[in-house]
Image: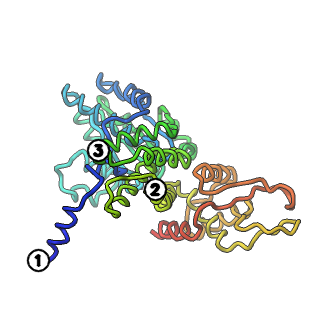
Amino acid sequence: MGLQHVFEAEFSKPTVFLDRNKIMPHYTPQNLPFREEQQATISGIVAVTLRGQRPDNIFIYGKPGTGKTSTAKHVMDELCSFAEKKSLKVKHVYVNCRTHNKKYKVLLKSLREIYPSEPDKAFQGYSAAYLYEKLVSFVRDTQTHLIMVLDELDKVRDLDDLIYSVTRSNDEIQVGGITVIGISNNLLFKDALDPRTKSSLCQQEMIFPPYNAEQLRTILEQRVQEAFAPQAVDSGAISLAAAIAAQESGDARTAIKLLLRAGELADDEKTTQVTDQHVKNARKSVEQEIILEHITVLPEHEKLVLYTIAALTLNRKPLQRLSGEKVEGVLYSGEVYEEYERTAKKFKFNDPVSARWYREYINQLEMYGLIVTTASGPGVKGQTRFIKLKVDALKIKEVLEKEFAG
């Protein structure tokens, strides 16, 4: 009989899910609640392509799980579908820059989307200059409006070169053109661009706010209808998942993952009902997963600052105040910056950022809930800021060391 009985058991076992794929983080629903205003704004900017005009570039910012990618993808799909019906030459490509993190890789991925019938090896082995010319030639020769959706744009290591090349390419194109929709979790990344690059951008900017608990509940109710069997999820479980995600970050992906994991726990118990207890049990593993996901999408030097805090925390003896009181795991802001500069050289990063940028990164890490900072206050010599890590120092150090080594 072999493994057939294993497959039969898996196939036949009861489940709370109707379509598990629709509660997965990568699924994009047709209806995106509470992002109608953002959809309308992006649509209004890119709709000029339908009249043969070149739209502005768009930069979209917001914390993870605020609907940036889903909204941009949905608008692009609708735009290109409408253009195809009207026989208009509008095309978009989507590139995840966390995976394709160099100009060469972004251009290669874009060409593969433009020429899907070409074999994967068709463009490999050529220089970035050749790929760039191939991309511009396609737009110029076909008179197409190409919109490049570059997700996690700040992950591109030679970002200045990529942005400058793509935006200036329009000087060579009479009809059609290339527009960039850049998506980033980092509000500050554009400030680090070369002034020459920034002057060529001609961009509009949007910020996606986090969802509140009521909005998250509505989003979850929609997903539950699509993904779970009827009446399989208690309303209390939905409310709790929404409340936890709103309290932590306003991140829809956190809320969705909580319900997914809760559903898996219900299946493991062979019960037909997902309860708030399943959500409570799911919380710890999901929180750890979300934290590690947030860390991997941080800008490179922000990761390095976090790594430095984790490494110092692991070696830190308790801080002793003048009163004799001992405080565990607390670091001085100045010592973290000095160690960060040394660590940047150790891992062969580009020049360490200035003290001003370091302070901005500390503020960002605190906003993400990864650290907490306080003024030194009485009982400590001098005035400084204390930094304390809120997550597992060893885990962060291990995860980031693997990234830096890769």
Q: Position of residue 331 (x, y in %)?
A: 72, 64
The front one of 294 and 200 is 294
Q: Position of residue 66 (x, y in %)?
A: 46, 42
Residue 121: image quadrant is bottom left
Q: CA distance from mark 3 to mark 1?
A: 35 Å
* Mark 2 or 1: the one toward you: 2
Quadrant where the N terminus sits is bottom left
N-term-proximal mark, 3 vs 1: 1
Mark 1 surroundings within 10 Å by alpha-carbon count, few (fewer than 14), some (14 through 19), many (20 or more): few
Residue 211, compared with residue 309, is above or below; it is above
Q: Is mark 2 in CB contact (under 8 Å) with mark 1?
A: no
N-term-proximal mark, 3 vs 2: 3
Q: Position of residue 334 (x, y in %)?
A: 74, 60
Q: CA distance from mark 2 to mark 1?
A: 39 Å
Q: Which residue is mark 1?
A: 1
Can I make out residue 70 in this image?
yes
Q: CA distance from mark 3 to mark 2?
A: 19 Å
Please give the name of the residue rendered at 43% of the width and 57% of the height, measured from the top-left corner: 278
> Which amino acid type is marked by label 3?
Pro
> Which amino acid type is marked by label 2?
Gln
Mark 2: secondary structure: helix
Q: Is mark 3 in CB contact (under 8 Å) with mark 1?
A: no
Q: Which residue is mark 2?
A: 277
* Residue 230 numbered tag: 3
N-term-proximal mark, 2 vs 1: 1
Outermost bottom residue: 2
Quadrant where the C terminus sits is bottom left
Mark 3: secondary structure: loop
Mark 1: secondary structure: loop
Outermost left residue: 1
> Which amino acid type is marked by label 1?
Met
The front one of 345 and 13 is 13
